[in-house]
Amino acid sequence: MKKRIANLSLASIDDVAERLENVRWKSDGSLTALCPAHDDHRNSLSVGVGDKGQPIFHCHSGCEYEEIVEALGASKPSTSPRRKKPDREKKKASDGMKRVGFVGPNTPDSDFKEMLGRKPDDTYRYADAQDRTVGYVVRVEGNKGKRFCQITPWRDEKGAIHWLIEDFVKPRPLYGLDELAAAEADEPVLIVEGEKAADAGQDIFPSHVVVSWHGGANATRQTDWSPL
Ligand SMILES: [Zn+2]
């Protein structure tokens, strides 16, 4: 059993999702599912992502962490091993690399299609106050529902930039920070929930600066609001 726990602690939330039933992804990248450790009929299990990228479990019916992990270890992945490969590569990918705060204009954009295995349904660029790209949030509509990935730049030992599916450093940057920085001091600011709403809002309210944040209502504290 110990071995299973060790293996699972290295797994990503995607690996875990493949072993669960009735998975419902949330906009902040967490999910709910039927708890494998008890006879569950109403998605009692919440799975989040810890600060080291590890999956975190909570059963609202009170199952212990070890019980959930053991039940997960006993259940078989529901999809072919091919689907799991990108996650393994991703884990290795950030080993030995250093985060890059922003990239210059000559850095090619991430090849999202190669990275995600498909073209994202929406791509949102995050920029700093100098309008330099600090990363992307992409929305992917899959057979398990929609999910969001944060994609950030990293530098390898030779100095080359790589785009990885890794979260922004918290507190995360505001979406629209570049517009905010470029605005006149008396320009009104509209804060909306979600990048999609921000893009739509900017079209509807061109006289405002429209900003948003990543992760939805439960993630407001993970964003740096100080520029406002
Ligand atoms: Zn349970």
Image (cartoon, rainbow, N blue to C red):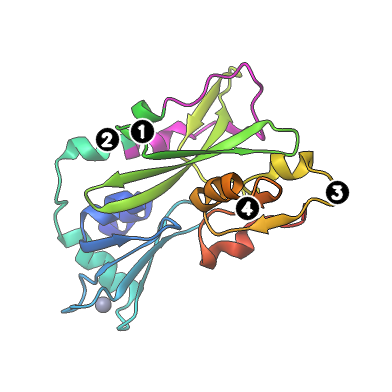
Name the amino acid type tagged 1: Glu
Q: Are marks 4 and 1 in contact (CB under 8 Å)?
A: no
Q: Which residues are magenta?
A: 87-111
Q: Residue at x 70, y 38 (%)?
A: 128
Q: Residue at x 14, y 54 (%)?
A: 76
User: Which marked residue is nearer to the observer: mark 1 or mark 3?
Assistant: 3
Q: Quadrant of the N terminus?
A: bottom left
Residues at marks 2 and 3, CA–CA distance in whole angstroms: 49 Å
Residues at marks 1 and 2, CA–CA distance in whole angstroms: 6 Å
Graded by Cα atoms within 10 Å as few (under 14), some (14 to 19) or many (20 or more), the crowding at tag 3 reads few
Q: Which residue is mark 2?
A: 85
Q: Earlier in the sequence, mark 3 or mark 4?
A: 4
Q: Which residue is mark 4?
A: 170
- Element under disc 4: loop
- Element under disc 2: helix
Q: Which residue is mark 1?
A: 89
When the figure is inspected, residue 127 is found, relative to residue 68, above or below; the finding is above
Task: Note whether residue 7 is visible.
Answer: no
Residues at marks 1 and 3, CA–CA distance in whole angstroms: 45 Å
Say if disc 2 is inside 8 Å of ligand 1. no
